[in-house]
Image (tube, grey):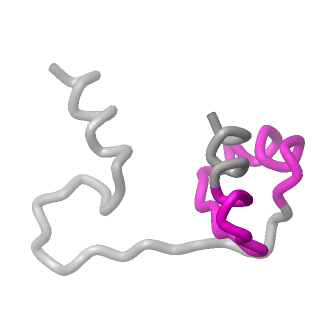
Amino acid sequence: MTRALVAIALEGDVEEGLLVANAEGLELYEYLGWTLLGDVYVYGAPGSERIRPSHSQFDDLKSEA
C-alpha cells in the first residue's frame, strides 16, 4: 500500500513526503526507502476523553469490547 501511495504522489511531481509511524513500523518504512528524521510527540488537551490523540485509539477500543 505504501508503495502504491508513493507512486501516486510521484505522479504529481512530489519531491518530499512526511510519514509518521510508530516504532513497530520503522524497519518496514526504512526498507521501503524512508529515512528517519526524528521523533514526533503528540499531546492531547487537558480533560480530553480520548485515550490517545491518534487513530490507534480505535484499535484499543475494539480489543476492549
Percent position (x, y) of residue 6?
A: 70, 51
Q: Quadrant of the N terminus?
A: top right
Write down the quadrant of residue 14 in the picture: bottom right
Horizontal side of 3 relative to 36 (left or right) equals left
Percent position (x, y) of residue 52?
A: 31, 57
Answer above or below: position of 20 versus 61.
below
Horizontal side of 65 relative to 25 (left or right) equals left
Q: Residue at x 30, y 34 (%)?
A: 60
Residues rendered magenta in the picture: 9-34
Q: Quadrant of the C terminus?
A: top left
Give whichever of 60, 28 is nearer the camera: 28
Percent position (x, y) of residue 59?
A: 33, 32
Q: How many marks?
A: 0
Q: Residue at x 28, y 22 (%)?
A: 63
Answer above or below: position of 6 versus 65.
below
Write down the quadrant of residue 42 in the picture: bottom left
Answer above or below: position of 65 versus 28.
above
Write down the quadrant of residue 27 in the picture: top right
Q: Residue at x 84, y 44 (%)?
A: 32
Horizontal side of 33 relative to 44 (left or right) equals right
Percent position (x, y) of residue 44?
A: 28, 74
Check residue 65 for magenta coloring: no
Horizontal side of 39 relative to 47 (left or right) equals right
Check residue 22 for magenta coloring: yes
